[in-house]
Every structure is written in structure tokens, then in C-alpha cells.
Amino acid sequence: MRTRRSKLRCRINLNGITGIYESAAKEIQKGVVQMGRIFGTFGVRGVFPEKMNPEFVYRLLRAYGTYLKRKVRNPVVGLGRDTRLSGETLKNAAVSALVESGVNVVDFGMVPTPAVQFGCRKLNLDGGVVITASHNPPEFNGVKLLEGNGMGLKRENEKIVEDIFFEESFEVPTWKDLGKVSQYNVKDEYINEIVRRVDKQLINSVKPKILVDMGNGAGAFTLPYVLEELGCRILSINAHPSGRFSWRNPEPNEENLKTTVEIVRSVDVDFAVAQDGDADRAVFINEYGEFIQGDRTFALAEREVLKRKKGTVVTTVATSLVIDDVAKEFGVDVVRTKVGDLVVTGELLKRGGVVGGEENGGVIFPDFVLGRDGAMTTALIVEAFTRSGKSFSKLLEELPYYYQIKTKIHMEGD
């Protein structure tokens, strides 16, 4: 068992209140829609079935389907979901609403959010839907709506969907114009594309040993297979998809990964990686079992991207200056935004940026997926580790330290 004296760590992140928008999704009671704001920083989430139920999802997707029908004659959307127990019933409600609106559905199955985003972009679809509550506890579920390029729905388009939702001005096609449903295996193509983007030969020559904690989420279908294809030796835990999330809460923060840390300290691995429920984030633990703040591994991925192509880096006001320090190495600018990957992605597109992310382990590679991608982040960091010839802790020590404290405030009410 590896041990060493730990450094004093104190982290402050003042973005804890960003999750409170979940209660903004209004309940539908006795068929009466209460007026109010629906969408939060990315989509809408709530507890099943009080705030997030088939009736709500059906009406929301009728609104989204109507919006698409008014833009495109025969719209096609990609759809996927995470592993939550309520996912199948909400997915069925979404499919029914879309088909009834005259929208064709390409069912990607149970896959990570970035795989759905990848599929929408690759197939040149008109939109996308992900049934997921991301890092929230198992009683939650939610809906993420996408643009045709896989990016989260733009604010101005969310407003259009909200107006249709509240006005109930849904399109009602004839029986001849109903949508159709098909299936598509996006998972394998997503995995293959990640593998193609890193140095497989180099990684395979070293064969790093990595513990992966999938947290029973959708990443179990992709990340272990990405690493296996790269030649890594893998020790998997919580890799069976289970919507109960019985081992740990889906959010891969330091508190929820205490047992994972203990396992790392008792086995011989180069480092560990853990994901959230829909696998758009990746957080890391070094070989000594020390939890690594997400902005530091974001900085490692940032450096790998900038080695390949110089360009603007985008991050939020909640991320430390370690991102700026890496950007200075390459003489590029860092742009700061409000919290939320949708905001970061929008700014990346606006400025032609090459990489973006947040301090929570979410990194965005806009030339691949227009949203956070935990598997792509992991693959790049595995390559950086392999090329360095150093231990994971030594590699991270090359980055300057910044200290933060992160807290959350829970609020109730509509």
C-alpha cells in the first residue's frame, strides 16, 4: 500500500447554488400547467414523480417537437438516456410526444450524454434529447434538449419551447404524418472516434494500470472499453449499470468517493478515474489515493489540446487560475463566463475556441462534442501521463496550486 504525507488542501468554489434551478420545473396537476420558468443551466431536472413525471415530459417534448416541425419539414432527433430506474418510462413518454408531433426519432439507447451529442452531430440530425439527471441522486431525473449539432438548446430556442409549452399550441399532424422510430448503435462509433484521437500505440506500449469507478452510470458502456482498446490494464468497480446507484451518489465529488479512495490506497494502480451518472464528467484520484480537484485535470487536458492546436480557452468564473497558467505557456487567451457548460460551449463556438471546461471535471472539446465529455477527457489525460514517464502525482505537481472551498445551499420552492 502506497502512503505519503498529504499536503494541506483548502478549496473554495462559490458556485454551489447553481443546482437550485431544479425546482424551477413546474408540476402539472390535474392537467393544468402552472406558469413559470422551465429550463435551468442545461435542461430541466426534478424528483420523480413529483416534479419529473411522464405527463410533464410528454408535454415538454410535444412543445419541442412542435418547435422542430415549425423549423424543418421532416425533423429527425437522436435520443438516449442514462441508467436511472425512471428513465424508461420517461423515454417512452418522450418518444410518444415526438412521434405524435411528426418528428422522427433515432434511438441511441442507454448511453452517456456526450455519446448522444456525438451522434446528433455525426448523423447531421435536427435535434436531440437526453433523459438524464446527470450527477443528481437516483430519485431525480430530467431532460436535456439539444440543437442539431449536439450542443444544448440555445436560450432563445428554449424560450420558444417554453412559450409553446405554456400556450399549449402543439402541432397535430394527421395519421399519415406521424414520426417513425429507428435504432442506431452510436456507442461503438463514439468509442472508436475517441481512440482515434489519441496515441494508441504509445499508450499500449506502457499499458498503464487504471481503476475506473463508473458509479453504476451510463459511462459503464463506454469508458472501460475506450481504455481497454487503448491497451490499459483496467480494474473496474461499479461498472454494472444500475439506476439505484447503490454504491455511491452519482456525483463524483470527494465526499462520495471516500470508499473509492480507500480502494485505490489498497491496490497498485497508476491512478483512478470516476464519472457521474451521464458520464459527461471525469474526476481523478492519484496513486496515493488523493482526490484531485477538477480544474487541475482540466489543465492537463488543456495542455494536451494546445500542443495539437493553439487557440482560445474558455472556462467559468469558478475555475482557478491554473487554466490561465497553462494558457500562458502557449501564448493563448482565456475567456471567463458564467457557470454552466452550455454557456462555455456557446462562447467556444463564438470565439472559435479549442478547449473549454469547468472545475467540476467537465471538459469540452468543440471539434469532437459540443458539450462536456468525460471519456475524451480521460483518454487525453492517459496519453499525457504515458508520455510524461512520471507518476500521476509528479505530473500534477508540475502545475501550480490554487486553493478553493466548495459548498452548496439547498433551497425549496417554485
Image: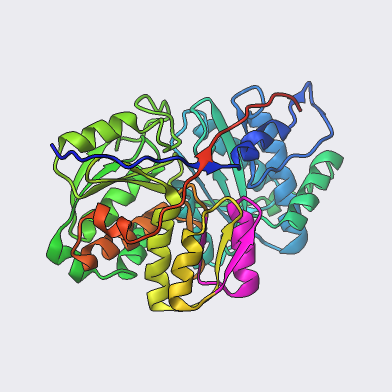
Q: Position of residue 191 (x, y in %)?
A: 34, 59
Q: Is residue 368 visible?
A: no
In this picture, residue 313 sits left or right of residue 253: right
Q: Magenta span has 336?
A: yes
Q: Residue placed at 74% from the left, 24% from the top? A: 413
Q: Position of residue 158 (x, y in %)?
A: 74, 51
Q: Is residue 295 visible?
A: yes
Q: Residue placed at 83% from the left, 46% from the top? A: 163
| Residue range of the region highlighted in magenta in the rendering | 333-357
* Most foreground residue, 253 or 62: 253
Q: Residue placed at 47% from the left, 32% from the top? A: 84
In this picture, residue 226 sits left or right of residue 283: left
Q: Quadrant of the N terminus?
A: top left
Q: Position of residue 68 (x, y in %)?
A: 71, 57
- Examine the rendered structure and indicate whether residue 155 appears above or below residue 285: below
Q: Position of residue 202 (x, y in %)?
A: 19, 69
Q: Magenta span has 88?
A: no
Q: Work out which residue is located at the far right of the displayed protein and give it.
A: 167
